[in-house]
Amino acid sequence: RNTAEKFEFQAEVSRLMDIIINSLYSNKDIFLRELISNASDALDKIRFLSLTDKEVLGEGDNAKLEILIKLDKEKRILSIRDRGIGMTKEDLIKNLGTIAKSGTSAFVEKMQTSGDLNLIGQFGVGFYSVYLVADYVEVISKNNDDKQHVWESKADGQFAISEDTWNEPLGRGTEIRLHLREEAGEYLEEAKLKDLVKRYSEFINFPIYLWATKEVEKEVPADDDDTSDEEETKTTNEWELLNDVKAIWLRNPKEVTDEEYTKFYHSLAKDFGDEKPLAWSHFNAEGDVEFKAVLFVPPKAPQDLYESYYNNNKASVKLYVRRVFISDEFDELLPKYLSFLQGLVDSDTLPLNVSREMLQQHSSLKTIKKKLIRKALDMIRKIAEEDPDENDGKDKKDVEKSDDDEKKGQYTKFWNEFGKSVKLGIIEDATNRNRLAKLLRFETTKSDGKLTSLDQYISRMKSGQKDIFYITGTNKEQLEKSPFLERLSKKGYEVIFFTDPVDEYLMQYLMDYEDKKFQNVSKEGLKLGKDSKDKEIKESYKELTKWWKGTLASEKVDDVKISNRLADTPCVVVTSKFGWSANMERIMQSQTL
Ligand code: ADP
Ligand code: MG
């Protein structure tokens, strides 16, 4: 069209589109899931605005919050329409021409090598998957604040936008028209679309209709002698509802199957791999603040989980109020250290007709947060409790055998993916410090390469041992050779290895556990069981220690003492009680670079 304004795609988008267009990726179906997910987001947005301003919805069909799919077999067009918020001209340029989210180039990089498009939705570029099946796409959109516009592109590096003067007015919302490629004919089959919607869009909370062909009986004239071979049916079209919109979290947990939870997780997390979540918790909170919630521990940590931990405010628990989606950016719902969880909260107590900002300050959120943390920590504890590897030698008669296999090794998996979050939790969350400490795992001088817990450590403590011993350093191999362990090992004491840089910080917050204090064995204050000869030896070397102390300038050492931790090594430098350990010095030095 002559009047159309032409735009170049951002270079990054062009690159992505090229990859998509030339992709041999076999699962082209995913485009439909992405389009329906966008339609659903747009409906969520207009519904949210309507809470404070009913006018935005308009009247009649316009007010129906629904998704409509239509096929035109002759013209080979598949169209998906929603009555969502729609896009202004500016929105079209911005949303369908540039990539807002960071990390996209990493995704492009990854896709080039793996060719796996399954995670496209997580990167905020799901729309472009339309070019898996279409060579020409039109996006017709009407937002309340603008006239109706058409965006169109043949994925040739540019797109065009025109004011729409020829299509039927949409009222409000967006219609995406896919001009299907030669080899994508299967998406013109009703059965295929029905199947895809069922499979991928089960948890969309708006009705999805297909303009489906129906066979109807032909009206038979009364004087027909019924001998003709002519078929007695003809076809018409009608809107057929494809999904069941009963939200999974409103159902009784006893009636929801594992498979349903897994699929729900995939749709929440936009993670369509085939891995099961490590655990989930579905509960109903009653009392002053009522809400329903489902929480999931993902099977894997996202790559950037700890990269910009303190600047990243990404929340992944979605907030609903009385079935209405409010936000997935409420970081008030869970503390930072639990931000790796996926899930959803739906509250009946929170008010519906206030702004997001007001809601954010609502006092009920504190109560919700408190309960969510409890449930989350319970859920994680249960992964360990049900893992046969964690309960070696314990009576396991409550756990069925088949269950056993599935749960085996799950806690180690959890620990490897999210252990750092538990440690950050101990640092951040004083209230739940003890609960979190129970979830800690580490290796020790006696754990034989396996992970062990504080409870297990305590159960093995020697009689007379008061403190929990640990040592910090870069790795286990180096620590095993440490002279600080000589005498402890000889006497049979178990010492924990802390080898993660965060462990040094952790131990500044974790002072004690179950009435036992933590003692860094490279620091002053190490007390082993009483040895009758200690006093005698101390006395006989009194002069020597005095001489040493005098010889070493006092700004270099605080004190010189007879050691109770060495066996073969003649002497060792120990950190004072309140000083940094040698390992901490090392960490601090590497950080000031
Ligand atoms: P994401 O959905 O993760 O943001 P997409 O590539 O799927 O990424 O979509 C990009 C943007 O385009 C969306 O964020 C939204 O602003 C806009 N958009 C896409 N489809 C629609 C639609 N049906 N209605 C309104 N806006 C849409
Ligand atoms: Mg999307």
Image (cartoon, grey):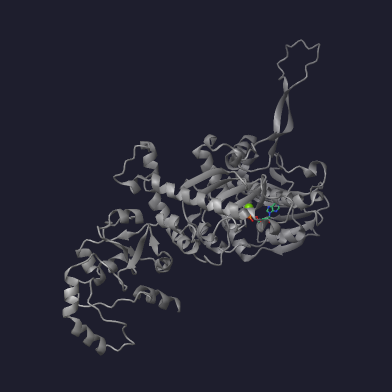
In the drawing, does residue 152 fall left or right of residue 470?
A: right
Residue at (27, 68) in percent of width and height: 527
Instruction: State whether residue 514 appears in this view.
Output: yes
Using the image, determine if residue 16 lies above or below residue 208: below
Instruction: State whether residue 498 appears in this view.
Output: no
The residue closer to the viewer here, 145 or 323, is: 323
In the drawing, does residue 566 fall left or right of residue 584?
A: left
Q: Position of residue 271 (x, y in %)?
A: 53, 50
Residue at (25, 89) in percent of width and height: 550
* Residue 533 figure quarter: bottom left
In the drawing, does residue 434 fall left or right of residue 332?
A: left
Residue at (34, 87) in percent of width and height: 555
Q: Position of residue 311 (x, y in %)?
A: 56, 67
The residue closer to the viewer here, 366 or 175, is: 366
Q: Quadrant of the N terminus?
A: bottom right
Q: Position of residue 496 (x, y in %)?
A: 31, 62
Using the image, determine if residue 516 lies above or below residue 214: below
Count the marks: 0
In the drawing, does residue 146 fall left or right of residue 110?
A: right
Q: Quadrant of the C terminus?
A: bottom left
Q: Position of residue 448 (x, y in %)?
A: 26, 56
* Residue 221 figure quarter: top right
The residue closer to the viewer here, 339 or 70, is: 339
